[in-house]
Amino acid sequence: MFKPLEFFIGLRYTRSKHKNHYISFISLASMLGIMIGVLALITVLSVMNGFEKELRERILGMVAHVTVSGTDGKLTSWQAVDEKLATNKQVEGIAPYIQQQVMISANGEVRGVLMQGIQPERQNAVSELEAHMLDGSLSTLKNREYGIAIGRELANAIGAYVGDKVTVITPSARVTPAGVLPRMKRFTVTAIYRMNMRDYDSSTAFIHMDDAARLFKMKGQVSGLRIRLDDLFEAQSMASSLQTELGSEVKVSDWGQDNKTFFSAIRMEKTMMFFILLLIVVVAAFNLVSSLVMVVNDKQADIAILRTLGISPNSIKKIFMIQGSIIGVSGAILGAIGGVLLAGNLETIIPALEEFFGAKIFPEDIFYISKVPSELHMSDVWMITVAALVLAILATVYPANRAAAVQPAESLRYE
């Protein structure tokens, strides 16, 4: 009449109302637990993907995809390397730079910063610094005018803004009749930027590359070349091929190597969050085990009758595995659908909740990322859903084996 028989009976047991309402409640709680666990996992991983993407874009707004530099901090024949790289179809932009650690002083305040000499007309090809200018622009950095662009936090720390003078103190020294003195130069603040990254807004500064060459005595030399590719995820293979092509006289690194510790920490945090939140699904699976065990105890007479009608122990096992799987599959599918809908609309839901409650989750004056970003990866959805389904199916094994071990004579003795 119904094929397969085990599926029909298992489905009927799932839909039937138990005499013991507590069993129905535990079954419903198990399904809801799996659903909430899957929903939470998808949402949290999507938010972490969003944060990782946001941070990656901000970091890559300041650093290049690939960097070619001298092993001793100086690249002498950089024009030849520049011309060679310009013929590569994967390269979108190249910009030379000079960088040194210096001290910046103004209004009695002193801060250590990474000073970078750039060519303003070429810098836009490898970074998004110009798009984050609050006051002024990179075009104000002109040769021999000694202009400097600093981050907003650095400007606030030393009290220097556009039009103000700052003193740059280099680590190299000069010998004078008064003794050995550090090299110093007065610069005029011509631009202030805000990258929304503390490391850059508080400890970097930019000047014209020719000014940097005179200041650091690097005439005809640069620290390296920054390269922007058409695909940032090809940076590692590009860096490896360039290192082989250019030889050991230069050092080639990609953005992943330069920020390896940072992105490794994010990946580890994402992995740990996955396993921590997976515990919600594990707890729900244990609830499923307990509910099925109680169902088996409640249905012992039914099992005994089915056995006397000729159904094998293996078929009895399948009946209860199907019943538990239906609960687990329903929870996993509903959780996946809810997680996709929530993660996909999180950037709309969070502002609505903030407006309703009149409070910001991430205030702009405290957090650099004031919005909750979300990036849904279907690979994460599939991985989480499959993990939930596997746990739900495994949860049915013990109760199903217990049902298969029921002895008809013992169960019917007191009926």
Image: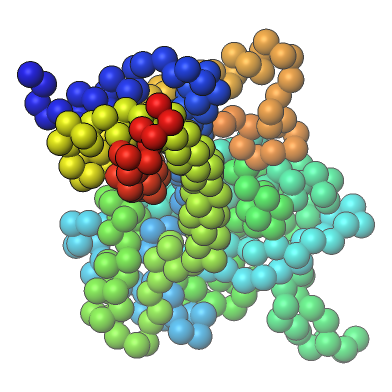
Foreground pick, 63 / 261: 261
Residue at x 32% of width, y 40% of height: 409
* Residue 210, image x, y percentages: 53, 64
Please say which color scheme the image uses. rainbow
Q: Is residue 95 visible?
A: no
Foreground pick, 215 / 292: 292
Q: Residue furthest top?
A: 356
The N terminus appears in which quarter of the rendering? top left
Residue at x 23% of width, y 79% of height: 245
Left or right for 48, reference 174: left
Residue 37 vertical placement versus 28 (above, below): below
* Residue 270, image x, y percentages: 50, 51
Q: Residue furthest front?
A: 413
* Residue 202, image x, y percentages: 71, 52
Foreground pick, 50 / 184: 50
The C terminus appears in which quarter of the rendering? top left
Residue 362 vertical placement versus 354 (above, below): below
Total marks drawn? 0
Residue at x 38% of width, y 58% of height: 65
* Residue 373, image x, y percentages: 51, 33
Q: Residue 16's quadrant in the figure?
A: top left
Residue at x 19% of width, y 62% of height: 87
